[in-house]
Image: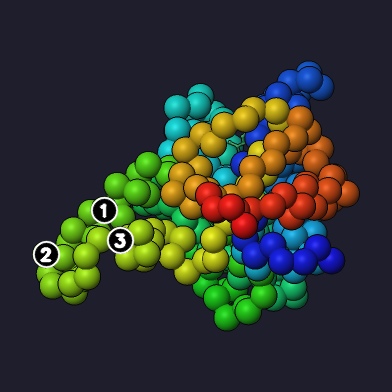
Amino acid sequence: MTPSLNHVAIIMDGNGRWAKKQNQERTFGHFHGVEKVREISMAANDEGIKVLTLYAFSTENWKRPLQEVEYLMQLPAMFFSKYLKELMEKNIRIETIGDLAPFPDNTKKVLMNAIEETSHNTGMILVFAMNYGGRTEIVEAAKKYQSAVMNGSMKDPLTEINFEQFLMTKDYPPVDLCIRTSGEQRLSNFLLWQLAYSELVFTMTAWPELSVEEFRDLLKVGLSRERRFGGLV
Ligand code: FPP
């Protein structure tokens, strides 16, 4: 077991390119991407990771062709219909960050059901970032802070620590490591505030073909780097 990684975040990229390489539709890649979510989540749980946050649908993903967006909306149902039982057995709790409001009713229902069913589990928290964007999160947090000041519930001056209480990740430990698959080296609006001091690890491997062995190696790369948080020690 790899010690002391509390919170790992993953940008699951490359489903579409992986599928195209095999002369398949992009949705074939997403289908296999769902299976990989199960495999890597279970591996993360075995590694003792406390929070695993997965970028499943960004605020920018709405710009994709309608047929692909509709397919992406079905992924939660595909995942939870197969694996909710196993998540319960492993004591894993499901949560989401992002604005679920624009999703179709059935997608929302499936997600809310998984959150509710697993809400008493005390093991790893598996967070799906759904219709999530880092800039929107920061703006929304600023608005919440402003309202709290206006209604008198926030009397303290604005500090980084106070501000974090208004982010969607307020209940989670800081992100230690962010992994991005499939070769791109950017954040794509993922956890902009939270990744300020995280280790970033990139792999050429597409998400659907990331093996548990490589995932463990990436965790080790993250752990082996010395984090100084801008200081000298
Ligand atoms: C980006 O790869 C990936 C996505 C937009 C979808 C990621 C979602 C999953 C892997 C499954 C989510 C599972 C649940 C249960 C919600 P891309 O297809 O854009 O890659 P490309 O850059 O090759 O086109």
In this picture, residue 76 sits left or right of residue 208: left
Label 3 residue SS: loop
Which residue matches tag 3? 159
In this picture, residue 85 sits left or right of residue 72: right
Decide: marks 2, 1 in contact (CB < 8 A)?
A: no
Give the residue type at disc 2.
Met
Is the shortest distance between ligand 1 and the CB of mark 3 under 8 Å? Answer: no
Q: Earlier in the sequence, mark 2 or mark 1?
A: 1
Q: Residue at x 42, y 59 (%)?
A: 168
Which residue matches tag 2? 150
Which residue matches tag 1? 142
Q: Earlier in the sequence, mark 3 or mark 1?
A: 1
Whole-number angstrom distance, CA of label 3 to CA of label 1:
12 Å
Label 1 residue SS: helix
In this picture, residue 144 sits left or right of residue 68: left
Provide residue 55's location: percent of width, then percent of height.
57, 46
The answer to whether residue 85 of the structure is visible from this angle is: no
Provide residue 183's location: percent of width, then percent of height.
70, 28
Q: Residue at x 76, y 38 (%)?
A: 208
Outermost residue, front side: 232
Decide: marks 2, 3 in contact (CB < 8 A)?
A: no
Provide residue 144's location: percent of width, then percent of height.
25, 59
In this picture, residue 9 sits left or right of residue 107: right
> Tag 3: Cα neighbours inside 10 Å, few (<14), some, or many (≥20)?
few
The answer to whether residue 50 of the structure is visible from this angle is: yes
Q: State the image quarter where residue 162 is shown.
A: bottom left
Where residue 36 is drawn, which disc sits there?
none
Label 2 residue SS: helix
Task: Please say which color scheme the image uses.
Answer: rainbow
Which quarter of the image is occupied by the C terminus? bottom right
